[in-house]
Amino acid sequence: MADIVSDGKSGKVVIKNIGLLLSGNIDHPILDADTIVVHDGFIQSIGKFSELDTSNAKTVIDVHQTCVAPGLIDSHVHPVFGDWTPRQNQLGWIESTMHGGITTMISAGEVHLPGRPKDIVGVKALAITAQRSFDNFRPNGVKVLAGAPIIEKGMVESDFKELSEAGVKLLGEVGLGSVKAGYEAREMVLWARKYGIQSTIHTGGPSIPGSGLIDKDVILEADADVIGHINGGHTSLPEKDVCELCEKSSRAIEIVHNGNEKVAIAAAQAALQLKCLHRVILGTDGPAGSGVQPLGILRLIAFISSMASIPAELVFCFATGNTATIRQLNVGFVEVGRSADLVFMDRAQHTSGKTLLESIQLGDIPGVGMVMIDGIVRCGRSRNTPPATQVPEVLTH
């Protein structure tokens, strides 16, 4: 096996002999193709090997009939700076999560920064600094979209304009700061939306000192773009309130690993019954008190598929194309023009499932054999997942 490429531009990459190609598109989750051609980090063509121009490739990867899927997106993380989390005093958590198939992370607020400023100048300064920092620093290629201010009382429209002009595109969880009333939150959410900043609201009981209960009425009144951890982070609203949110709100339904598992299934089943699975996205809500979960998204996919009886190929879309669409990202789909962020998987060794999808629907997580970001292979066989039955092979570069 050739050495793994770790830096520079990808050049032309041919990914061949794909056994199962997941698209990320919930309306068409499986593609009838066995080859992907990548050029300088972007998907150039998809189809049958005999029909594509596969000549003069810098790198050829033989997938050995295993699965290729869009890189997974964690829609809810709490980074601080660098690849370190003070909440658990752990180094390398982002790089470790990449071994669980994650290629993009989205901050729900840098709330764990020791001494986090809560005055308006400090709130804006922290958000802009975090946005700049992670724009320049990508642990092993992982894309961390950070700089998500926790809104505080006293902020005015010009603050959101200033944040937007500085490059901030996200609000941290509404409700983790001093703004907790629905009418106050709604005004700031509208200001944020006016300037192209997407908002997420905390759902459920308090998760950190200073946060509080955010109930269904506040969530409906605030009308944030994402109903953050609808299954609680950690403590959930009553199941009937969660189902009511799924029905009465048109916003994204975010299910997280670090939440109430019973309510997670209720939310997924409600979305299925309401025919709005395209609104469901997944996050870990880590690092948090329960730690760092490098396999959190994979575990959530297997959990929802097996317990909510939703086909695995659809649940993968929750963590890929659904999130990319709602978050307006050029990742999450196997589609021409998209970033070549891909995860290569196979069924875990000795799973009772005869195929990858069957094994997931039985509750087993897959084995990751390779992760690619921007067309560059970032790791081979994962050190964190159970060993994949078969792994891809880099033939040339």
Image (spheres, rainbow, N blue to C red):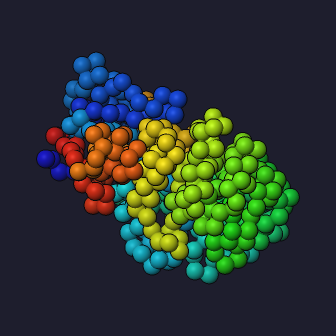
The quadrant in which residue 279 appears is top right
The residue at 63%/71% (across/down) is 207
- Quarter that holds the C terminus: top left
Residue 357 in view here: yes
Residue 61 position in % (x across, y down): 22, 38
The residue at 40%/59% (across/down) is 295
Residue closest to the far left = 1
Residue 374 in view here: no
Judge from the rendering whether residue 72 lies leftward or rightward of residue 252; answer left or right. Answer: left
Residue closest to the far right = 183
Q: Is residue 304 shown above or below 336?
A: below
Looking at the image, how many numbered discs can be counted on the residues?
0
Residue 20 position in % (x across, y down): 32, 33
> Depth check: 313 or 175 in front?
313
The residue at 16%/40% (across/down) is 395
Residue 169 position in % (x across, y down): 64, 53
Residue closest to the far top = 51
Residue 268 position in % (x across, y down): 58, 46
Q: Is residue 25 shown above or below 216?
A: above
The residue at 30%/43% (across/down) is 353
Judge from the rendering whether residue 327 lies leftward or rightward of residue 210; answer left or right. Answer: left
